Every structure is written in C-alpha cells, then in structure tokens.
Amino acid sequence: MPRVKGATRLRAWLVREHYSQRELAAACQMHYTHINQILSGRRNPGLAIATRIEKLTKIPASIWVPPNESPAEEARRRKLRLARRRELRAAAKGGAKVGLKADNPTDGLAGAP
C-alpha cells in the first residue's frame, strides 16, 4: 500500500529546496526512476533508502518504514519475497502448482495478514 503522506512531503521538499528528482537520486545514491516511483506511490523505499532520504531531507524514515522494523527484518522479508518470485517463475515455466508451506500459509510476505 503506497504511503502517500511520505511522497507528498518529499515532493514538497523537492519544490521548496529547488531539487530535481535526478539531483535527489544522485544525492541518495540511487537511480532517478526509483525516486519517481516513490513520488508516484508505485513503490515504497526500504529502510536503507528511507534513511538516506531522511539524512538529506529531514523527512523521517518512519513515514515509509515502520519504526519497529530492523534492517535484519527487512532483509528477511526481501529474501522471502525473492524466493517466492523464483518459485512462481519456476512453476510458470514447468507448469507445476505452487503451494504454500503448511506451517506458514502466508510465507512471510509483506502485507499478508
């Protein structure tokens, strides 16, 4: 779910400070399309990128990332998402059914209940 509040504050900061999306991306060491996706609400930054944005803009990283999420938790969730994607791609190529683990029906994916 996009966090529009953060995107709105970031866009206002860009206007106020006369920064372009490319300048912000360069200052945060990331690709400018990622900034565009954050601003349009198609993507939320992870903890590392939110922290870089916070250092430059003083917009709290907690707007995008829950404050109780540690870098280790973010990395764990990213690994689970990537593993799930690989499994789905393999299943699509082979025509096999993809099942969830019996002990964890959500496979730890973000946004799952």
Image (spheres, rainbow, N blue to C red):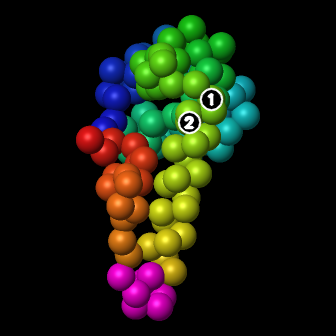
Q: Crowding at label 1, few (<14), some or many (≥20) Cα neighbours within 10 Å?
A: few
Q: Which residue appears at 40% of the width and 26% of the height? A: 7
> Which quadrant of the structure image shows residue 11?
top left
Q: At label 2, which amino acid type do we have?
A: Glu
Q: Amino acid at mark 1?
A: Pro
Q: Is residue 17 at all visible to an observer of this figure?
A: no
* Count of all numbered marks drawn on residues in the image: 2
* Observer-nearest of 29 and 80: 80
Q: Which residue is mark 1?
A: 71
Q: Residue at x 40, y 90 (%)?
A: 95
Q: Quadrant of residue 44?
A: top left
- Residue 61 coordinates in the image, percent (x, y): 52, 18
Query: Where is 41 relative to 85, above or below?
Result: above
Judge whether 11 appears above or below 72 on screen: above
Depth check, front residue: 14 or 75: 75
In the picture, the quarter occupied by the N terminus is top left
User: Does 92 lie within the magenta span?
Assistant: yes
Instruction: Decide whether residue 93 is among the magenta residues.
Output: yes
Residue 101 seen in render: yes
Q: Is residue 62 left or right of residue 48?
A: left
Magenta residues span 91-97
**Residue 2 in the figure: left or right of residue 83:** left
Residue 74 numbered mark, or none: 2
Alpha carbon of mark 2 to alpha carbon of mark 1: how far? 5 Å
